[in-house]
Amino acid sequence: MNPYILAALLFGLGLGTTITFASSHWLLAWMGLEMNTLAIIPLMAQHHHPRAVEATTKYFLTQATAAAMLLFASTTNAWLTGQWDIQQMSHPLPITLITLALALKIGLAPVHSWLPEVLQGLDLTTGLILSTWQKLAPFALLLQIQPANSTILIAFGLASTLVGGWGGLNQTQLRKILAYSSIAHLGWMILVLQFSPSLTLLTLLTYFIMTISTFLVFKLSKSTNINMLATSWAKAPALTALAPLVLLSLGGLPPLTGFMPKWLILQELAKQDLALTATLAAMTALLSLYFYLRISYAMTLTMSPNTLTGTTPWRLQHLQFTLPLAMTTTATLLLLPLTPAVVALLTL
């Protein structure tokens, strides 16, 4: 892609998110979300491949539906209460509709079906933008409206952790596994949204760090399915040794960074007398852990069959800039000791 066009599209992505962040009026927030969608569509369709075009079309249709629902809900809110202000949501009907529209935008269960299909059709770089940056603007709105109906949020959260765990069990395609991982993590964030918004932001930040690290590992080894990971030891042995730790951090195992948000969320849910919800969420985390372990096993404990048809790939010099990978991997593995400092900041 022409670098000038790429720069313009990335600028559009950044501007759309920033407009949504800065807006206090629903129309402006909607405009920012639309700019975001329109800026990423050419990035998604840049490889003229039927899968990429199909993924782009699916993404466009779901985002347009969610944006239309958001606009309808905010208009309904203005009609019922005379308010266009994001902070002044008082009527339950538009609040529920907007929560549903934003859930569709980020891919929460039960309106998640588009996310694995879309992510599977994209290259890893665009998939990374879709899994991280594109979640920011809808989350900013969710945090601002603070939906009063707590039952719907807990239902969304539990459904997402469950679907995210179950859906990934039978997958061999890494991008689909990462999509289900994304759904599960979003479920954890939504569970605790109404009790501790700052904890939701912490979870979002750690999810971003871990997901960037995972995508960059797969990008460096040019892997798109589990079988291709079996040859990654020949391309980058040191990285192949670290990659399972990154995946286990995504799964939320101590003593890795990914354990911190899950631990704090379970503690917060227990404080709110939601012991059953916390138990269910912890059980669904085991489902996710299974498929991370499966990928780790494929990477480190299996050798690719060295027949003539499946010879070990050449260890050529890769052209990827590895500083972001080094930084995110370090953060993914080593931030758990900062938990007391984080808890102190959350309680300020």
Image: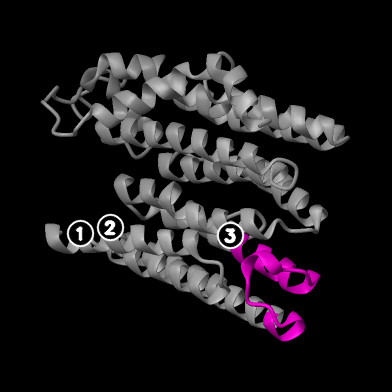
CA distance separating discs 2 and 1: 6 Å
Query: Where in the figure is residue 86, as x and y percent of width and height?
Result: 63, 67
Earlier-in-chain disc, 3 versus 1:
1
Q: Are marks 2 and 3 in contact (CB under 8 Å)?
A: no
**Which region of the structure is painted magenta?**
78-103
- Count the marks: 3
Q: Is residue 127 visible?
A: yes
Amino acid carrying label 3: it is: Leu
Residue shown at 37% from the left, 28% from the top:
328
| Label number found at residue 10 | 2
Q: Is residue 303 visible?
A: no
Q: Are marks 3 and 1 in contact (CB under 8 Å)?
A: no
Query: Where in the figure is residue 316, as x and y percent of width and height?
Result: 11, 25
Query: Where in the figure is residue 146, as x and y percent of width and height?
Result: 70, 56
Q: Depth-wise, is mark 2 or mark 3 nearer the camera?
A: 3
| Label number found at residue 141 | 3
Earlier-in-chain disc, 2 versus 3:
2
Residue 313 painted magenta: no
| Disc 1 packing (10 Å; few <14; some 14–19; many ≥20) | some
CA distance separating discs 3 and 1: 27 Å
Amino acid carrying label 2: it is: Leu
Left or right: where does residue 319 sit relative to residue 258?
left
- Residue 120 versus residue 316 in the image, above or below: below
| Label number found at residue 6 | 1
Q: Secondary structure at mark 2?
A: helix
Q: Depth-wise, is mark 3 or mark 1 nearer the camera?
A: 3
Residue shown at 33% from the left, 25% from the top:
327
Q: Are marks 2 and 1 in contact (CB under 8 Å)?
A: yes
Q: In the picture, which quadrant includes the C terminus?
A: top right
Amino acid carrying label 1: it is: Leu
Q: Quadrant of residue 44?
A: bottom left
Between 194 and 54, the one nearer to me in the picture:
194
